[in-house]
Image (cartoon, rainbow, N blue to C red):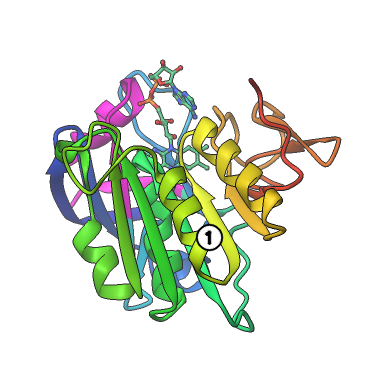
Amino acid sequence: MLCELVGKRKLAEKIYDFTVQCPEMAKNARTGQFLHILCGGEAYLRRPISICDVVDKRYIRFVFEVKGVGTDALAKYELGSRLDILGPLGNGFELHPEDKNAVLLIGGGIGVFPLLFLAKQMKGRATVLLGFRNKQSVIMADEFATVSRNVFLATDDGSFGYHGFVTDVLKNILSSNPVSRIYTCGPAPMMKLVCQIAGENALPVQASLEERMGCGIGACVTCTCTVGGQRKRVCKDGPVFDGAEVEWNG
Ligand SMILES: Cc1cc2nc3c(=O)[nH]c(=O)nc-3n(C[C@H](O)[C@H](O)[C@H](O)COP(=O)(O)OP(=O)(O)OC[C@H]3O[C@@H](n4cnc5c(N)ncnc54)[C@H](O)[C@@H]3O)c2cc1C
């Protein structure tokens, strides 16, 4: 669909927050799904970007970091431009309103963006753990605070929040609180450890994987990973999988 860019903000160095008007996509969008965006410039293939939020059932918001040619071209669009977007795509997070104990949302770096929509859907029940490199890269923490029960922050260098990895915060929480379920999105080493800790504590965990993608609709099989001993397409079968079944590389 061609969607008008109606909101554009620079949140931090190389981080952009876009809102597009797209009522058809917005009303079908589920938490954890993504958009496949034709960025222009030298990027021939579309680039996958997670849905960060749906506003008034008319607008979709996504937040992205400029990494290379595609996201660099995307960042240059001005308000009023029309973006060519395929979506919403993929299988997102499964909600479990029946959970009685704490539900933990664990994000790292650009992996925090899709968790905002999830936290909102949980209507104040989510406990959110966010990990960043340093104070300068802490992003959207205030927004998470307005929609969550608790927000815990960790930075690798200790310049903000807990000094260390978000997985240390996870271990602390698990040592003194009953928890029902974990959702995670972020760098693969972080998610691997989150899933390992979840397994040691017999907790269900859903992980949103990130792989380089081609078509985004399951045809080109570029973005495969191994889940439950089978090859799965991140775009079509995921990006959210049962974290206990994911075979992490490395
Ligand atoms: C389901 C899904 C959801 C995503 N959601 C978001 C989001 O909400 N916000 C956001 O900022 N990013 C998100 N990403 C990552 C984003 O798609 C990539 O950063 C983007 O495609 C890079 O394109 P580019 O043309 O700017 O970079 P390129 O020029 O293609 O590459 C620049 C550098 O980044 C590396 N790279 C590119 N894509 C990936 C990848 N998927 N995994 C590992 N390394 C990669 C390349 O190897 C290269 O070193 C998501 C990815 C997936 C699969």
Residue 217: image quadrant is: top right
The quarter of the displayed image where residue 12 is located: top left
Q: Is residue 232 visible?
A: yes
**Element under label 1?**
helix
Quarter of image, ligand 1: top left
- Spot occupied by residue 191 in the image (x, y as percentages of width and height): 55, 40
Q: Position of residue 99 (x, y in %)?
A: 61, 79
Q: Which residues are magenta?
A: 62-85
Label 1 CB-ligand 1 distance < 8 A: no
- Residue at x 30% of width, y 33% of height: 156
Residue 227 pos. (x, y %)? 77, 39
Which residue is the site of mark 1?
174
- Would residue 158 appear left or right of 131 to someone viewing this image? left
Q: Is residue 241 left or right of residue 119?
A: right
Q: Residues within 10 Å of mark 1 (few under 14, many from 20)?
A: some
Residue depicted at 22% across the width and 37% down the height:
158
Q: Is residue 233 above or below residue 149?
A: above
Q: Tell me if residue 67 comes above or below residue 151 in the rendering.
A: above
Q: Residue 169, percent across and down?
A: 41, 51
What residue is shown at x 41% (from left), y 81% (from top)?
A: 123
Of residues 10 and 189, which is closer to you in this image?
Answer: 189
* Front one among 36 and 153: 153
Task: Give yes or no for residue 69 being in the magenta stretch.
Answer: yes
- In reply to whether residue 72 is colored magenta, the answer given is yes
Residue 79 seen by the camera? no
On screen, residue 142 versus residue 226, left or right, reads left
Three-letter code, disc 1: Leu
